[in-house]
Image: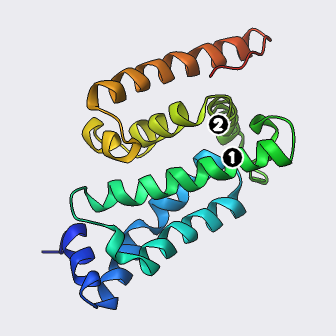
Amino acid sequence: MAPTDETLMQRFQTGDRGALSALIERYREPALRFCYRMLHDPDMAEDMAQEGLARILLHPDHWSGRAKFSSYLFSILKNLCIDEMRWRSRWHGGTLENWDTADLGPLPEEQIARVEQQQEVQAALARLGPDHKAALILREFHGLPYEQISDVMGWSEAKTKITIYRARLALGRVLSANEGGERHVTR
C-alpha cells in the first residue's frame, strides 16, 4: 500500500528526499493543470507549478500537518496564480480574457467542437474573479470536496459552498451572454 501524502511529507520533513520526489510525481500534473486553468498560459502554468513545488522543497517546515498536503499545495498554487493574474492585469493592461491559449494544432473534425467548447469555458472562467475562479476549478476540475476547498481558500465550509454556487451562476451568465453576443464582466 502506497504511503499517504501526509506520511510522505512528514518523511520529507525528517530528511527523506525520496519522499518529496514521490509527492512531486503525484502532484506535478494536477498542479500544472490547476495553474493552466487559472492562467491560460502553458509556460506560465509550468513556472507557477514549479514555483509552488519549489516552495515546499525550500520550506518544508511551513506545512504543519493540520491540513491535507493537497490543500496546502493548492493553497500555495492559488496564491501564486492570483498574484500573477494581478501583476499581469496591472502591468500588461487589459483584461485577463485577452491572454492567449495554447495552440492546439489541427484536430479531427469531431474534436473541434469539443475544443471550441473548452475554449469558451476557459474564456468564461477568465472573466470570473480570482476567488470564484479558483474555487470553481478546485471543485469542478479537480474534484476536491468542499471541506478541502475551504482549507485551500481559508474560508468556512458554508462560505465555500455559497461562493461555488455563485461562481457557477456567474459562469453560466457569462456563457449565456457570449451565446447572445453580449459581453459583460462578472466579479
Q: Which mark is residue 85?
A: 1
Residue 26 in view here: yes
Q: Amino acid at mark 2?
A: Gln
Judging depth in this view, the residue of 143 and 67 nearest the camera is: 67
Q: How many marks?
A: 2
Judging depth in this view, the residue of 149 and 64 nearest the camera is: 64
At 36% from the left and 76% from the top, the residue drawn is 60
Label 2 close to label 1 by CB (< 8 Å): no
Q: CA distance from mark 2 to mark 1?
A: 15 Å
Q: Which mark is residue 24?
A: none
Q: Mark 1: few, some, or many residues within 10 Å (few <14, many ≥20)?
A: some
Q: Amino acid at mark 1?
A: Met
Judging depth in this view, the residue of 29 and 53 nearest the camera is: 53
At 37% from the left and 20% from the top, the residue drawn is 162
Q: Residue furthest left?
A: 1
Q: Is residue 48 left or right of residue 144?
A: right
Q: Is residue 25 left or right of residue 132?
A: left
Query: In terms of secondary structure, where does tag 2 sit?
Result: helix
Judging depth in this view, the residue of 113 and 3 nearest the camera is: 3
Q: Is residue 77 left or right of residue 9?
A: right
Quadrant position of residue 73 = bottom left
Residue receiving disc 2? 122
At 33% from the left and 58% from the top, the residue drawn is 70
Relative image position of residue 31 (x, y in whole percent): 48, 60
Q: Nearer the viewer, mark 2 or mark 1?
A: 1
Query: Against 115, is 7 above or below?
Result: below
Query: Against 139, is 37 above or below?
Result: below
Quadrant position of residue 2 = bottom left
Relative image position of residue 18 (x, y in whole percent): 32, 89
Q: Is residue 128 left or right of residue 134?
A: right
User: Quick one: label 2 or label 1, which is nearer the N terminus?
Assistant: 1
